[in-house]
Image (cartoon, helix red, strand yellow):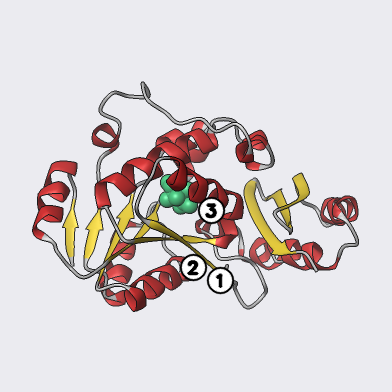
């Protein structure tokens, strides 16, 4: 497994690669079984798999959230090696944003609900970095989890809008045995909190409507940001032990 820690180093490396197909899994590290499933899918569908690990400062509207975002680089690299990843891209922020925040992408529709409202600037940061990473990697396919379903839909349209030739592939949410959606943020929960967090999935599936789901989650001790229905799915974002968790399920 080759690890590129600079943009220039990666671009030189990319020039030397000419596999039949490249699969790309962009991540912010703190890898878990959800990321592993994306890597496995990429490996099954492509000759070569590239993973990026980049904690994107531009998508954090809260500096405390950025600071405490879990960073487990040594473990991440060991896992990627074990999974058979070919290339890892770990660029420094100054190289991903050579002009600071001078350039960024805005979207006026899908990003105006849910995560876009609760986390101002979040989608601007995600879209900007994803476009940069897609341009750097020039993959045939890029893999994103359905846990971040709104993000997936936004990225699909972003790729179409900017004529990015990479196919955007959505992959099912991986869940812990309790039903809790796999997420890097789960690492920040206490063992009891981790058990309780599975309530989000249960309530999303069983509540009669978003209002009832919101009430049930509040009664269970969550601080609810939203429960809403879009794209034929029901979505929730809620805080537990000060950690923000999101999930979604298909309706019906
Ligand atoms: O879903 C994530 O981990 C991030 O939003 C992404 C797509 C890697 C962009 O930083």
Q: CA distance from mark 3 to mark 2?
A: 15 Å
Q: Residues within 10 Å of mark 3 (few under 14, many from 20)?
A: some
Q: Which numbered disc, 3 or 1, marks the residue that appears first in the sequence?
A: 3
- Residues 90 and 13: in front is 13
Give the mark nearest the N terminus, 3 or 2. Answer: 2
Check disc 1 and report the residue beneath it. 174
SS under mark 2:
helix
On screen, residue 10 above or below 37: above
**Res. 105 mark:** none
Mark 1 near ligand 1 (CB under 8 Å)? no
Q: Which residue is disc 3 drawn over?
A: 152
Please report contact status of discs 1 and 2: CB closer than 8 Å, yes or no. yes
Where is the N terminus found, in terms of image quarters?
bottom left
The quadrant holding residue 178 is bottom right
Q: Give me the disc on residue 34.
A: 2
Query: Which residue is drawn at the image coordinates 51% and 46% (left, top)?
Result: 157
């Amino acid at each position: 497994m080759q690890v590129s820690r600079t943009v220039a180093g990666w671009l030189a490396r990319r020039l030397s690669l000419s596999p039949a197909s490249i699969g790309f899994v962009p991540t912010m590290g703190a890898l878990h079984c959800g990321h592993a499933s994306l890597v496995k899918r990429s490996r099954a569908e492509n000759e070569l798999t590239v993973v990026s690990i980049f904690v994107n400062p531009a998508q954090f509207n809260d500096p405390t959230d950025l600071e405490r975002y879990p960073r487990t680089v040594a473990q991440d690299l060991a896992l990627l090696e074990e999974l058979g990843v070919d290339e890892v891209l770990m660029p420094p922020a100054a190289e991903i944003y050579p002009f600071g925040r001078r350039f960024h992408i805005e979207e006026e529709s899908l990003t105006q609900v849910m995560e876009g409202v609760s986390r101002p600037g979040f989608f601007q940061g995600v879209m900007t970095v994803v476009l940069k990473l897609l341009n750097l990697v020039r993959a045939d396919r890029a893999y994103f989890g359905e846990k971040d379903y709104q993000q997936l839909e936004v990225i699909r349209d972003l790729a179409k809008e900017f004529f990015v030739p990479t196919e955007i592939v959505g992959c099912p949410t991986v869940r812990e045995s309790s039903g809790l959606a796999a997420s890097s943020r789960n690492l920040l929960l206490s063992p009891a909190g981790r058990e309780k967090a599975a309530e989000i999935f249960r309530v999303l599936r069983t509540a009669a409507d978003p209002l009832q789901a919101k009430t049930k989650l509040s009664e269970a001790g969550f601080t609810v940001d939203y429960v809403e229905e879009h794209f034929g799915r029901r979505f929730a974002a809620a805080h537990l032990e000060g950690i923000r968790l999101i999930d979604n399920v298909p309706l019906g």
